[in-house]
Every structure is written in C-alpha cells, then in structure tokens.
Image: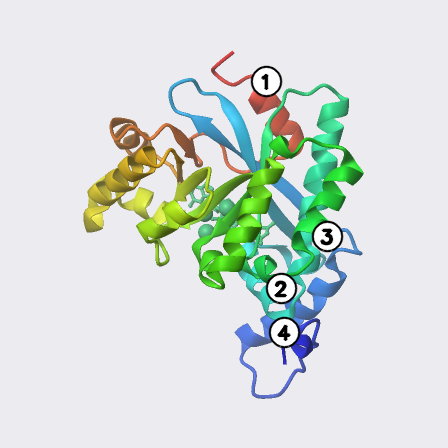
Amino acid sequence: AKEQGKNKYNVFHSGMNIQSYRSFLLQNDLRKAIDNNEFFLVYQPKVNIHSGQVKSAEALLRWKHPVWGLIPPNEFIPLAEESGLIFEIDQWVFKNVCKQIQTWNNNQVEYIRIAVNLSAKHFVEKNFIQNIIQVIDEFQIETMQLEFEITETALLANEESIKQTLKQIKELGIHISLDDYGTGYSSIIYLRNFPLDSIKIDQSYINDLPNNMNNSVEIVESIINLAKKLNITVIAEGVETVEQLEILNELQCKEVQGYIYSPPISSENLVEYVQNDDSK
Ligand code: C2E
Ligand code: CA
Ligand code: CA
Ligand code: CA
C-alpha cells in the first residue's frame, strides 16, 4: 500500500467539491513543477535581538503556478506529502540551497548558515543520510553551513531510528532545529533525548504574548528557561510587533525571526541584509 501511495495519480470524480477539485488539479500540476522551473526559494533571516547579527536564514519554498499564480506552501506541501512527491521536492530544495551556498562561497560572500525544512517523511527513508552526503560533496560546501528544521511529528514516528538519524546528522556537523515547538506533543524528554541545537517557539505563542492570552507568557518563559538549562538555543518565530519583541527581550530570548525584521526575501536581498546588519 505504501508503494502505491508513491506518485499515484488522483482521478477526478463528479462528487468532488470546488476545494478538492483545486487540490486535484494542483496535485497533478505539482509533478511538472520541478521540470517547468516553477519553484523558487526565498530566505528569512534569524536575527539576534541585541546585536542585530544574522548568523542563519531559513529557506522557504515558493511555487509560481502558470495559471493560479503563487500557491502557498501550506497548501501544496501537504499535497506533496500525500502523493509522495515531497521527497523529490525537498531534494530539489536541498540541492538548490547547497548550490546557492556554493555560489556565495565562490564569491566570498560572508558565511551564513541556511536552514532547510524537512518533512517528517524523510526520517524513515533508508538512503536519507547517503543522499545528503552526496549532495554536500557535489557542491563542496561545509556541513556547518547547513541546518535542518524538523517538526515534532518527525520525532514521534520511530523514536530509536530517528534518534540515530539525528545523531548522524549532528556528527556530520549540520545544525538541527526543532520547528513549531509547542504545537505537538512537546515533552521535556524529547529535548533531552534528541541532539538538538535549537528550538523554534511556534508563532501562535508569540501571537498571544501581548495580552498574555492562554498563559503564553508563562509558557514561553518556561520553554526559554528549560532550553537554557539544556544548552539549546531558542528562536521565537513570527515576531511582528515591537510589543512582542519587548516581552521576548525581557524573557531573555535572544534570537527572533519575523516580519518585524524581515519577511522571506530573495537571495540577493538576503546578502544585502546580512552585509548591512546592525552588528557592523
Ligand atoms: P514554517 O517552517 O513554520 O515557516 C514559517 C512560516 O511563517 C513561513 O510561511 C513564513 O513566511 C511565515 N512567517 C515568517 N515570519 C512571519 C511573521 O512575522 N508573521 C506571520 N504571520 N508569518 C510569518 P511559508 O513560507 O508560507 O511556509 C509555510 C510552511 O510551509 C512552513 O512553515 C513549512 O512547514 C512549509 N514549508 C515551506 N518551505 C518548505 C520546504 O522547502 N520543505 C518543506 N518540507 N516544507 C516547507
Ligand atoms: Ca521552518
Ligand atoms: Ca515554524
Ligand atoms: Ca509551521
């Protein structure tokens, strides 16, 4: 059944509503998107509150559909996961990030780490690590220039094998970030059992900070304190307002990502942003 799920074609049937018809069309078009050059990457800096320094940025995928225009990843990534295309797509993202880093290295652009989002599905793939090593060799970049962002659900699937995979990633020198922290089953055990470099507090908590909705201040504070004890860096994502920034600063959160500093931008604009960051 698993094999069948891979690259299967959806068949249209007359009972479909508009939304599932759109999904049906998009899912089939997704197959051609790589070959037709419809994907591109944007990058969002992760900024140190105190120094303004940017040491890392996250690569985010964009799909420009020839008819429908920009399709948000929240719409097409689930479709890609469903059809099995996510392997090809994330591989495309990883290769293009490595290629971009190689270009920067060749042009003596200042060192910056790039984070790649990986779907939970990769961690059960047998050749996952070998593929990564092969691409890194192909583009001759340093593993320290790479970071993987994974969600908690990835850790849930098969704890022992995932722990081994993460260990291998870490031994290669690639940073590991736990994404959307607080939205899943985020147990303290996880933070201790997996070799994580950083955790990203989900933007829903950051959103709630100003009026301390749903006890978000206490929750964020306890995440920060715990991470500090475990020597894990904390990043707040989706920071939009000065008010949120001030609360995070008070709570001693040092790294943030969000529209308040920069939305996701082109590679050229990222270079410019890094060269002009406040730490210089
Ligand atoms: P994510 O990894 O949690 O990425 C953060 C999302 O929040 C991004 O949306 C980003 O543009 C958005 N964002 C950043 N700052 C702010 C802010 O201040 N306010 C608000 N409201 N939003 C902010 P985006 O780019 O639409 O991506 C959505 C999701 O799609 C990502 O969530 C990630 O799960 C997935 N995704 C994106 N690119 C890839 C990829 O290459 N591979 C995989 N597997 N998933 C990807
Ligand atoms: Ca992410
Ligand atoms: Ca996130
Ligand atoms: Ca998310």
Q: Mark 3 touching mark 2, by CB under 8 A?
A: no
Say whether disc 1 or disc 2 marks the residue closer to the N-terminus.
2
The residue labelled by disc 4 is 24
Amino acid, disc 1:
Gln
Q: Mark 1 touching mark 2, by CB under 8 A?
A: no
Which residue does the image show at 54% across and 52% down from the upper left?
A: 164
Which quadrant of the figure contains the N terminus? Answer: bottom right
Give how far apart the Cα atoms at labels 1 and 3 are. 29 Å
Give how far apart the Cα atoms at labels 3 and 2 are. 15 Å
User: Could you say where residue 59 lies in the image, as x and y percent from the top left?
Assistant: 59, 41
User: Could you say where residue 196 lies in the image, as x and y percent from the top left?
Assistant: 46, 42
Q: Which mark is residue 275?
A: 1
* Mark 1 close to ligand 1, CB under 8 Å: no
Give how far apart the Cα atoms at labels 4 and 2 are. 11 Å
* Residue 59 in sight here: no
The residue labelled by disc 2 is 80
From the image, state whether disc 1 or disc 3 is nearer to you.
1
Amino acid, disc 4:
Phe
From the image, state whether disc 1 or disc 4 is nearer to you.
1
* Mark 3 close to ligand 1, CB under 8 Å: no
Say whether disc 3 or disc 4 marks the residue closer to the N-terminus.
4
Which residue does the image show at 45% across and 29% down from the upper left?
A: 261
Q: Residue 38 carries which label?
A: 3
Which residue does the image show at 63% across and 74% down from the upper left?
A: 24
Element assignment for label 1:
helix
Say whether disc 1 or disc 4 marks the residue closer to the N-terminus.
4
- Determine crowd level at label 1: few under 14, some 14-19, many 20+ residues with C-alpha closer than 10 A: some
* Residue 104 in sight here: yes
Which residue does the image show at 32% across and 42% down from the upper left?
A: 206
